[in-house]
Every structure is written in C-alpha cells, then in structure tokens.
Image (cartoon, rainbow, N blue to C red):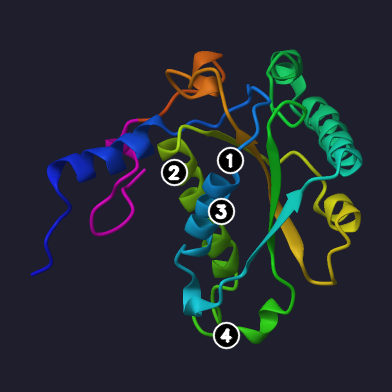
C-alpha cells in the first residue's frame, strides 16, 4: 500500500490550499527566474484528460502589450458593471485586478486543434477546459508555497485577447494571471472581506448516491 506524505508535508499541502488567495494587490519586485521556471513546470505537470496537455502559456513582457490587455479588461469591467443592475455601484468599488502592479502577466490559453483529441472528450469536450483549470490551480498552489501571490482575471472578451496575442484559429484565452510578490496575503478571500459573497458550508455541496430532493 502506498505510504502518505509525512505529517509536516501533508500540513504544507493543506496550508497552501487553504491560504491560497485570488490576489489583487501586488508589489513590483521581480520574480526570481528560477522560481518562475518552477511555477511553469508545476503548471505543466497538471493532469489532463487523454494526456492531451491542452494548455498554452503566454508570458507578457512587453509593457505596451500589458497596457493593451489592461484596456481590454477595463472595457469588460464596465460592461460587467452595467450588467449587474442594482449591484453595479458595489461592483465598481471592488479592485478586480492587479495587472499594472504585478511583476508577471501570464495568459493561460487552450490550444488550437483540440478537436483531434477524442480520448475522454467524445461526450464531454469541455474536459480540455477542465484540464487547463488544473494547470492554473497547480500554478496557484505552487505560487503560494513560494510566497508569491496570483490573481485570476476573467473580465475580458476572449476574441479581443486572442487578437492581441495573435493566437491561431481555434486557440482560446482562458485566464489572465497576475503573478508577483505581495505585501501580505488576505486573511480570507477578498470578495468575502468586501461582503460580496461568503463561502458556503461544504456539507451543502456534497451529496450521497444522487441529487437531494428539493
């Protein structure tokens, strides 16, 4: 029978999970290249359905391109605010990204030509997206273990970002990831601290032998 990690190793894994935060506030200190390489390798070791490895990672090093990506996010932020109706003003008070402060911008995308991969996707083609999400989570947890913050930005039009990054037909951006040093990690998820939402009890989300009756 396979042996578990040591108690201290297990504690470190659970600590990274529970202390991971979607960060919006960064300090501009550069990320050590060796650490960045470890984080990218952690992302690349994510599980993927049919071992298709559908993630593609674009590192943004051009200040001009970073600014254009930020503009794309700002356009969608305003459209999202308008769509929220009564919660518009509350949303506009939230800090939803740290793209102008973080040390690194990474765009996580789906590869082109995904239709060729049938294993595990014949009835659930969205499993390519699930696989990319696993890569993002690997990167996020590894970043927390390295003392770095990461924020997932999803407020953008995928077609706009695909054009900015000259992605081939069929490729699709999934996330703009802000990565870098932070002064401190939030004590709880920022949206919970801001009163936007609260984490539900796990008991309300775990069912046994089927869906509960309404």
| Residue 134 visible, this orientation | no
Q: Position of residue 38 (x, y in %)?
A: 50, 53
33 to 47, vertically: above or below = above
Q: Nearer the viewer, residue 76 or 97?
A: 97
The residues tagged by marks 1 and 3 sit, at their Cα atoms, a distance apart of 9 Å
The residue labelled by disc 2 is: 141
The residue tagged 3 is 37
Q: Is residue 202 magenta?
A: yes
In-front residue for pair 29/5: 29
**N-term mark: 4 or 2:** 4
**Which residue is label 1 attached to?**
32
Residue at the image position 88 percent from the left and 35 percent from the top: 67
- Residue range highlighted in magenta: 201-214
Sequence-wise, which precedes: disc 2 or disc 1?
1
Q: In the rendering, at what x and y percent does residue 201 appear?
A: 32, 31
Is residue 213 among the parts visible in the rendering? yes
When asked about the image quadrant of residue 64, the answer is: top right
For residue 60, which numbered disc appears in the image?
Answer: none
Q: Measured along the vertical axis of the image, is residue 171 above or below residue 37?
A: below
Seen from the viewer's position, the closer of residues 40 and 140 is 40
Q: Does 113 sit above or below residue 20?
A: below
Give the alpha-carbon distance from disc 4 to disc 2, as whole Å. 29 Å
């Amino acid at each position: 029978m396979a042996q578990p990690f040591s108690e201290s190793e297990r504690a470190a894994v659970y600590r990274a999970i529970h202390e991971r935060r979607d960060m919006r506030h960064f300090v501009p200190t550069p990320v050590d290249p060796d650490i960045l390489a470890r984080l990218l390798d952690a992302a690349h070791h994510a599980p993927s359905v049919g071992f298709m490895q559908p993630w593609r990672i674009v590192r943004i090093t051009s200040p001009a391109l970073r600014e254009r990506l930020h503009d794309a996010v700002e356009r969608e932020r305003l459209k999202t605010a308008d769509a929220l109706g009564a919660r518009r003003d509350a949303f506009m008070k939230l800090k939803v990204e740290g793209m102008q402060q973080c040390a690194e911008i990474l765009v996580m995308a789906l590869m082109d030509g995904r239709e060729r991969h049938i294993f595990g996707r014949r009835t659930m083609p969205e499993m390519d997206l699930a696989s990319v999400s696993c890569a993002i989570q690997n990167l996020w947890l590894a970043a927390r273990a390295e003392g770095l913050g990461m924020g997932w930005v999803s407020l953008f039009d995928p077609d706009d970002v695909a054009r900015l990054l000259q992605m081939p037909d069929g490729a699709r951006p999934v996330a703009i990831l802000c990565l870098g040093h932070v002064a401190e990690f939030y004590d709880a998820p920022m949206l919970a601290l801001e009163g936007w939402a609260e984490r539900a009890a796990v008991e309300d989300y775990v069912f046994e032998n089927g869906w509960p009756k309404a």
